[in-house]
Image: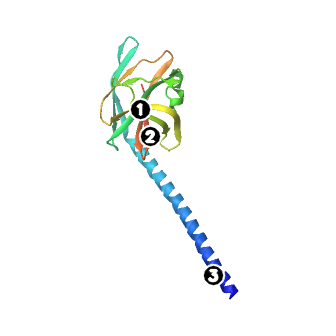
Amino acid sequence: MESSVIAFILIIATILIGLVVFSLSSIYATYQYTRVNLQQQAESISNGLYISISNNVTAGSTISLFLVPQDFNYNGTIYLTVFYVPSSLKGNQMITPQFAYTQNGEIVYATVNGSAPNVPVTTLYFTNLNIMYQGEMKLWKTITGAPQVITLSPPAGYTSVVLFFVQIQNKFVEVGYEWL
């Protein structure tokens, strides 16, 4: 009789262990699927993004230009930020806001459409979903196909870069950049 009770307990324990292992593996698989899906969506948007830029109009130390973000694979809200980085970094593909010109500890932004940035964020991601930047960053919200008037006043020794982001599952993911 005791051996049948022990066997029954072992069977129940084995079933419970199997259910726990199955649950944990299901949770992990769901997380991985979601991450891969998000990454593929960001890469698709990034691959379709193209930027039209007008000729610069210079007035003193201020430069103005039109910029139109368009995308073959995406039609919707896009976020952008324009800041200044050392000219020696121009062409660098891994440019992030950590290189931005600051005054009094705050990033100095160019002006887009004559307004201040309106979307504060704290974490930005690369297309592969690695963290690009953590800290206060401000973005302008617009839509693909909408012309943007960029007004630049880069400090001496600095150049301008615009970064483009989309919000996918509450993450701001970089889908492109353009040196100005």
> Residue 151 location in percent, x, y?
37, 21
Q: Which residue is mark 1?
A: 139
Q: How many marks?
A: 3
Q: Is residue 93 visible?
A: no
Mark 3 or mark 1, which is nearer the start of the sequence? 3
The single residue placed furthest to the right in the displayed view is 2
Give, as a three-letter code, the residue at label 1: Leu
Say which mark, if any, is on residue 13: none
Mark 2 or mark 3, which is nearer the start of the sequence? 3
Q: Secondary structure at mark 1?
A: strand
The reply to whether dot 2 and dot 1 touch (C-beta < 8 Å) is: yes
> Residue 39 location in percent, x, y?
46, 48
The residue located at (41%, 32%) in the rendering is 139
> Residue 16 location in percent, x, y?
59, 71
Q: CA distance from mark 1 to mark 3?
A: 62 Å
Q: Which residue is mark 2?
A: 172
Q: CA distance from mark 2 to mark 1?
A: 10 Å
Q: Secondary structure at mark 2?
A: strand
The single residue placed furthest to the left in the displayed view is 146
Give, as a three-letter code, the residue at label 3: Phe
Structural crowding at the residue carrying mark 2, measured as other residues with C-alpha within 10 Å and reported as few (<14), some (14–19) or many (≥20) = many
Query: The N terminus lies in which quarter of the figure?
Result: bottom right
